[in-house]
Image (cartoon, helix red, strand yellow):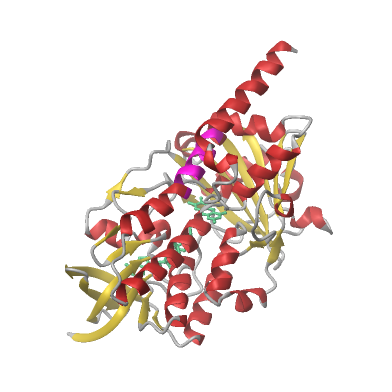
Amino acid sequence: MSKEFVDVLVIGAGPSGCVSSSYLKKNNVNVKVVEKTKFPRLVVGESLIPRVMDHFDEAGLFPALDKMGFEKKLGARFLRGSEVCIFDFSDKFGEGWDWTWQVPRADFDNTLAQEVINKGIDLEFETEVIDIKFNGTDSITTVKNKNGETKEIHAKFVIDSSGYGRVLPRLLDLEKPSKLSPHSAIFAHVEDVNREEGVEGTLISFDIIETEVWLWVIPFSNGNTSVGIVGPTEYIDKLSENGDTTEALKKAISLSEYYVRRFGDVDFLFEPKHLKDYSCSVKSLFGDGFALTGNASEFLDPVFSSGMAFATEGGMTAAKLAIRQLNGEKVDWQTEFADYILYGVDVFTTYVKEWYTGNLQELFFHQPENPDVKKKICAVLAGYVWNKENPFVKKHDTVIKNLANLIKTEKQQQ
Ligand code: FAD
C-alpha cells in the first residue's frame, strides 16, 4: 500500500475542514484534506450567522466568497401569524460583523474547496477515510479512492471535519445521543418565480406554525429559495407518512398563511430531503492526536443557524492549537478546545431549548419591544456566544426563563 506523510490530515472539505486547512497552510503547516464526495454536492445549512465571517476572514477565504455575490443576510425575521419580529445584526450588543450570507451550499462549499486548492493545499476528492490507527499522537489513516485503491496517510495530527460522516466518532466509539428532544426536517429548493421585487423577496424568515413547528424560507441571489419545515420527529413522520416528501413539503407550505401564495404552486428543484433526528453529540471533542469539529462533533438544531458557526469556530480553534502542539508546546485540549467550544454550545443549547418551550417566542413577540433586551439577544443570534459581557450569554440559563415568566405573569394580570 502506498504511503504519504503530512503534519495534519483534515477529513472532510466542508466549511469546517476548509477553514482549518486554509489557516494551517497560511501558517506553513504541511496539511492534506481528503473528501469523500465530488464537489459540488448538496448539503443543508444555508443560513449563516455573522460569527462565521471572522473565521473566513482570518483563514483568508473571505475574498473568494465575497466575489460570488451571495445574498447578503443583514438579520433574520421571525413570523407568528400576524406578529413579526425582525433582528438587525447592525443593532446588536458588542463587537462583531453586522452581516453575513444566505447561500446555496453546493456553490458556497465548492467555492471554499476551490480556494483551498488555489492556496496550494492538497485536497483529494472522492477519497474516503475507512480506518485509522493511533500510536500516541501519531496516526495512520487508511483511505480509499473511487477506484477502490487504498493508501496510508501518516499524520502528526488529525482534524475530523467529516460532518454527518462522523468518521472518528464511529471508528473510536465516541457517539453520544444529543440532550435535545428529537426533531426532524424536510427541505428542498424552488425556483422562486413569485418572488417580490425588493427586500421582501430576499428576506430570510422563520414562520412559526406551532410552538415546535416552523418553516424556513431562505432566498438565494441565484433566484432560487430554500424552503423547509422543522418539527418534532413524530410530527414530521406523520407529515411524510407514505414516504412522499414532495407531498409532505407541499402540505407544510400550505400551513403558512404568509408563504402559501409564493410557494404553493411551484415545483421543487429536487425531491425534498428528509433529515430525521438530526441532533447529535459526542463523548469527547478530542483525544491524543485528534480533534473533532463541526457536525463531526455536536449538532444542535437549525433554528438559530448555529451549525456553520460551530463548524468554523471548531475548525479555526483546532487549527490554532494543532500549530502550537506541532511547535512543541503543551496544549491543554480540555480547557483550550473542549471547554471553550462547549461553552458556546451550552449557550445555544439553552436558546434552542427555550425556543421549543415557547419562552423565547414570548420574548421575541412581546410588545412593546425592549430595545436593550433585543440588542443582547441579537448578539447571541449573530453567534457571539463567547462574549461574557453580554448578560444574555453569561446568564443564559436563567435570563430567558425569568423574563418569559414575567411576561406571562403580566399577561395574566391584564
Ligand atoms: P459538512 O458541511 O457536512 O462537511 C463534511 C464533509 O465531510 C462532507 O463534504 C462529507 O462528504 C465529508 N466526509 C464525510 N465522511 C467522510 C469520510 N469518511 N472521508 C472523507 N470525507 C468525508 N447550519 C447553519 O449554519 N445554518 C442553517 O441554516 C442550517 N440549517 C440546517 C438544517 C438542518 C435540517 C440540519 C440537519 C442542519 C442545518 N445546519 C445549518 C447545520 C449545517 O448543515 C452543518 O452544521 C454544517 O454543514 C457543518 O459543516 P461541517 O464542515 O462540519 O460538515
Residue 42 rendering spot, x and y as whole percentages: 51, 65
Residue 134 rendering spot, x and y as whole percentages: 18, 68
Magenta span of residues: 344-354
Residue 35 falls left or right of residue 229: left
Q: Check the picture and name the quadrant holding the C terminus.
A: top right
Residue 23 rendering spot, x and y as whole percentages: 46, 75
Residue 271 falls left or right of residue 382: left
| Front residue (pair 191, 403) | 403
Q: Relative to 318, does residue 177 appear above or below in the rendering? A: above
Residue 346 is a magenta residue: yes
Is residue 394 visible in the rendered image? The answer is yes
Q: Which residue occupies the extreme top position in the image?
A: 413
Residue 289: name its quadrant. Answer: bottom left
Q: Check the picture and name the quadrant holding the N terminus.
A: bottom left
Q: Relative to 337, does residue 276 appear above or below in the rendering? A: above
| Front residue (pair 237, 86) | 86
Residue 107 falls left or right of residue 322: right
At horizontal 26% and vertical 52% (from top left) the residue drawn is 174
At horizontal 51% and vertical 44% (from top left) the residue drawn is 348
Q: Relative to 335, does residue 325 appear above or below in the rendering? A: below
Residue 390: name its quadrant. Answer: top right
| Front residue (pair 36, 9) | 9
Is residue 44 visible in the rendered image? The answer is no
Q: How many marks?
A: 0
At horizontal 84% and vertical 58% (from top left) the residue drawn is 198
Residue 105 rendering spot, x and y as whole percentages: 56, 65
Residue 152: name its quadrant. Answer: bottom left
Q: Which residue occupies the extreme right position in the image?
A: 197
Residue 248 is a magenta residue: no
- Chief secondary structure of the magenta portion: helix
